[in-house]
């Protein structure tokens, strides 16, 4: 696959690093484009791919173009797309909140468009992403986006109306989990552990429990019951969490972020 990247910042670089290490693309098949020299240099150093300032060069050399600028820069980036160079190409946007219809109306008509919502753990190969296909997509386009997103984590296909829910859950979710890790570590410090030990133990516990859910496919309630012995320590801790309404606080957090994403999408 010949892959072009418009916007070689954190996410654009991480996606290419993942695709290269998973063998989805060779660095020689990738070309990046960014307005900033430091971004181009960093992209080249980390991915082994070349980078340019010429959009036309990226479009003509690529079958698939990853659009990785900030949402507010998307329209300016698309304005430089030349219809001849773009003809028949697949454009994959990672911009939060920018709708398919908007991208399709600004991109040359011959381009097929996919919208994705990755999250920051993609930077360490543990992303959780969703994507939705545009009206002009063809057979085979879904396999391309799946291969790229799976190289940096997991990906699911959703109808576009659920992208706000994805933003509220996995898009904003890393911040909720950082807060939970910090609070767990505070508890450990209060119980006598050093701060560095407490943070490591808390983070690894969250990561390990998440891996158990993903690997076993078991419902989290089943896994929770398996580690909760009658009259033991875990049920004593769980009882406090239930009393503090942690469950409903997390549900409300996802709903509030989903609503905010919908609001921002309209503006
Ligand atoms: N970082 C995240 O948490 C995250 C999560 C999900 C989705 N996203 C989406 O990823 C996109 C990129 O985010 P990021 O954190 O990598 O941003 P970033 O600022 O690190 O990278 C964006 C890059 O785009 C370049 N750029 C701007 N205008 C350009 C143009 N016209 N042509 C070429 N390059 C241009 C900038 O110079 C910059 O290097 C955003 O749209 C964001 O919504 C980010």
Image (spheres, rainbow, N blue to C red):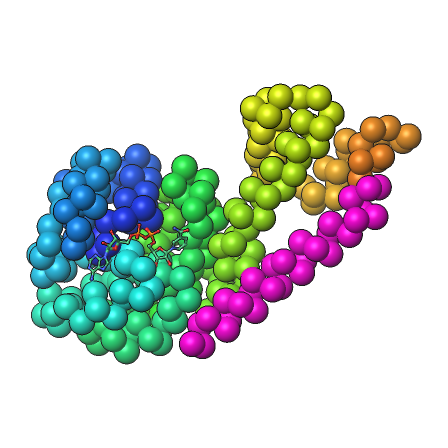
Indicate yes or no whether the magenta region holds residue 177: no
Residue at horizontal 17 percent and vertical 51 percent from the top: 36
Camera sees residue 1? no
Give the dominant element type of the magenta stretch: helix, strand or loop.
helix
x, y percent for residue 193: 66, 21
Give the image quadrant in which the ligand numbered 1 is located: bottom left
Indicate yes or no whether the magenta region holds residue 262: yes
* Left or right placement of residue 66 versus residue 83 in this view: right
* Left or right placement of residue 228 versus residue 86 in this view: right
Span colored in magenta: 239-267
* Left or right placement of residue 135 versus residue 224 in this view: left
* Left or right placement of residue 135 versus residue 164 in this view: left
x, y percent for residue 59: 14, 60
x, y percent for residue 221: 75, 44
Residue at horizontal 59 percent and vertical 44 percent from the top: 179
- Relative depth, front residue between 122 and 156: 122
Task: Name above or below for residue 189 compared with residue 259.
Answer: above
- Relative depth, front residue between 197 and 115: 197
- Relative depth, front residue between 6 and 37: 37
Quarter of the image containing the C terminus? Answer: bottom left
Residue at horizontal 35 percent and vertical 58 percent from the top: 94
């Amino acid at each position: 696959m010949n892959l072009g990247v418009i916007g070689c910042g954190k996410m654009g670089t991480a996606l290419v690093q993942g695709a290269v290490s998973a063998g989805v693309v060779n660095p020689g098949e990738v070309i990046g484009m960014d307005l900033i020299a430091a971004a181009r240099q960093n992209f080249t150093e980390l991915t082994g791919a070349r980078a340019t300032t010429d959009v036309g060069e990226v479009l003509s050399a690529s079958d698939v173009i990853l659009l990785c600028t900030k949402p507010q820069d998307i329209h300016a980036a698309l304005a430089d797309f030349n219809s001849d160079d773009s003809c028949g190409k697949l454009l994959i946007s990672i911009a939060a909140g920018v709708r398919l219809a908007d991208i399709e109306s600004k991109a040359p008509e011959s381009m097929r468009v996919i919208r994705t919502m990755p999250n920051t753990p993609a930077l360490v190969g543990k992303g959780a992403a969703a994507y939705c296909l545009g009206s002009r997509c063809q057979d085979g386009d879904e396999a391309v986006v799946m291969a790229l997103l799976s190289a940096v984590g997991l990906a699911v296909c959703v109808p576009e109306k659920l992208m706000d829910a994805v933003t509220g859950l996995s898009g904003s979710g890393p911040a909720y989990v950082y807060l939970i890790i910090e609070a767990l570590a505070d508890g450990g410090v209060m119980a006598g552990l050093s701060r560095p030990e407490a943070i490591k133990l808390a983070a690894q516990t969250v990561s390990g429990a998440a891996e158990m859910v993903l690997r076993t496919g078991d419902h989290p309630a089943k896994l929770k019951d398996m580690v909760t012995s009658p009259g033991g320590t875990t049920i004593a801790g769980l009882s406090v969490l239930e009393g503090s309404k942690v469950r409903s606080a997390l549900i409300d957090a996802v709903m509030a972020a989903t609503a905010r994403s919908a609001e921002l999408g309209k503006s």
